[in-house]
Image (cartoon, rainbow, N blue to C red):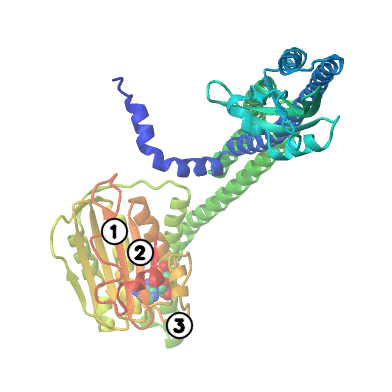
Amino acid sequence: MVGRTGFNRGIWRDWRSWPARVAGLWRSSLQFRTVTITVALSGVAIMVVGVYVSVSVGNDLFQSRLNQVLVESNRATTAAQGIFDASDAADRVEVQTLVGSARTLITAASSSQLIAIFRAPGQDASTVAPQDSSSFGASTGVITSDLRVQVQENRGEQFWQSVTLATDDGGQVPGIVVGSQLTVPVAGHYELYIGYSLADAEATLGFVQRTLGIAGLVLVLLVGAVTWIVVRFVVTPIRVAAATSQRLASGDLGVRIPEKGEDVIATLARSFNGMADSLQSQIKELADLSEVQQRFVSDVSHELRTPLTTIRLAGDVLFDHRSTFPPAVERTAELLHAQVERFELLLSDLLEISKYDAGSVQLETEPTNLVHLAEDAIDGLRSLGDSKGTVLTLVAPGGHLDADVDPRRIRRIMHNLIGNAIEHGEGKPIIVSVDSNESAVALSVRDYGLGMSQAEIAHVFDRFWRADPSRKRTIGGTGLGLSISLEDAAVHGGWLQVWSHPGEGSCFRLTLPRTARGTLTSSPSPLPPADAAGGTGRSETGGHYA
Ligand code: ADP
């Protein structure tokens, strides 16, 4: 036995997936769709034409054969009747001989072997009259009584009917039986039936039908092939245009479609390229503009630093001597000191964010223990917490707590998150937790203060955004803290996310990969926090993912 190849076996085993594959091809390939529709429609058209041609050829063949048959049978009948009319046969033997020779004549004139001669009923019995004879054999039954009645009642006329004749080999062929009357001397009236086979005509029709079928099939295949080639000519440039626009949409602004010729495809290519040119130049303009803006912010911040340092020094002198001033001036010196401090803070935040915008941030990573960083950050903010009556707790269950991070930036994030929690925590306890797994470390800062609404969460990482700018501030936030923290987290390949709900407090979670080039798939800390009312459903509505 010849074994089937693995490839074939695969195809046959996959037959269940065929409809889905064809449906997929139908949806995705314009070429396949066009070729299928064209082949189907031209197939139907060719079939209709084929059936029409076959039916009319069949009718024509039958009609011409019938005419020929009628002429031949008429000729045979007339010749036989001529013999009878000219004969003077009088006894049984003579009549018998006469009928025999008439039969031979009929066979010769009609070119048919199927001949039946029956004595017409309703005549007196005669001893001279020859017996009925038939060479129809198994097909004698095709001479129906209807035909016989018509022949018996209409002397001198021909009648015919379509029949099915049995062949010697047991098959069947279509045929025609023609009947007429003869008058035999002395013996009376006889019915003559001559059978003709239409096997030749049927064979011709079969040949015509086969030829039509093959020609139709070849035509459909040719139409399919031609359509495939034509559609390919049209679809290929469209496919190139689609691929190019996809690349353009994904940010590759330099791609263009080759422009060839003057036709509609060339027009499409030209207008597409024109569009891409203007898009590219506009984006370049915007990029230039944004670069100018970034440089402006950076330059202004740098320029402001020197005068600010001088102001700061002068302010410090005034602040140190405030007790010697009259009360109104003393208050002014304090105010000046506080605002200069705020100004410095804002300036350093601006410089930091302009570094991120310029893409010039360099990470200085080193193996760092996040628990130690968190302890330092909490210690640094403890006095602020005490002033608000806030208890700061660190929860660190242990594990792989070292991570390759830039400690300065992570410290800044922690300082910002814990500072915010104290600011907005309404004096309630704050829990800072550090947790880890093999691939990531996470720090969450949970407070039970004001919390934020869904709309506020959507903006919490925006630059200069504050939920309530008039809210009393202790550490004088700039509104840039969380946006810098977000950049700090992102530059580590980490996440900074928040869950919050008005009245229930907030939880900010920082997740960092433990290695410099690691990627995150999950975080060791839960968000929403485990103690969040309303369960985990809150994460979609209350969560913000950086
Ligand atoms: P800043 O704290 O300097 O105003 P941030 O970017 O750190 O700027 O925070 C932006 C705003 O987000 C804050 O003004 C505050 O309205 C809101 N926010 C931040 N953290 C919390 C928190 N833990 N609880 C409630 N609101 C918060």
Q: Nearer the viewer, residue 317 or 458?
A: 458
Q: Nearer the viewer, residue 137 or 513?
A: 137
Name the residue furthest bottom: 327
Q: Are marks 2 and 3 in contact (CB under 8 Å)?
A: no
Q: Which residue is mark 1?
A: 511
Estimate how packed mark 1 is, as few (under 14), some (14 to 19) or many (20 or more) residues with alpha carbons within 10 Å: many
Q: Which residue is mark 2?
A: 497
Q: CA distance from mark 1 to mark 2?
A: 8 Å
Q: How many marks?
A: 3
Q: Position of residue 157 (x, y in %)?
A: 85, 31
Q: Are marks 1 and 2 in contact (CB under 8 Å)?
A: yes
Residue 46 seen anywhere in this rendered image of the structure: no
Left or right for 529, reference 351: left
Report ligand 1 position as a quadrant: bottom left
Q: Which residue is depicted at the point 84% across and 35% down?
A: 154
The label shown at residue 329 is: 3
Cβ at disc 1 under 8 Å from ligand 1: no
Q: Which residue is depicted at the point 65% across and 46% down?
A: 282
Left or right for 26, reference 393: right
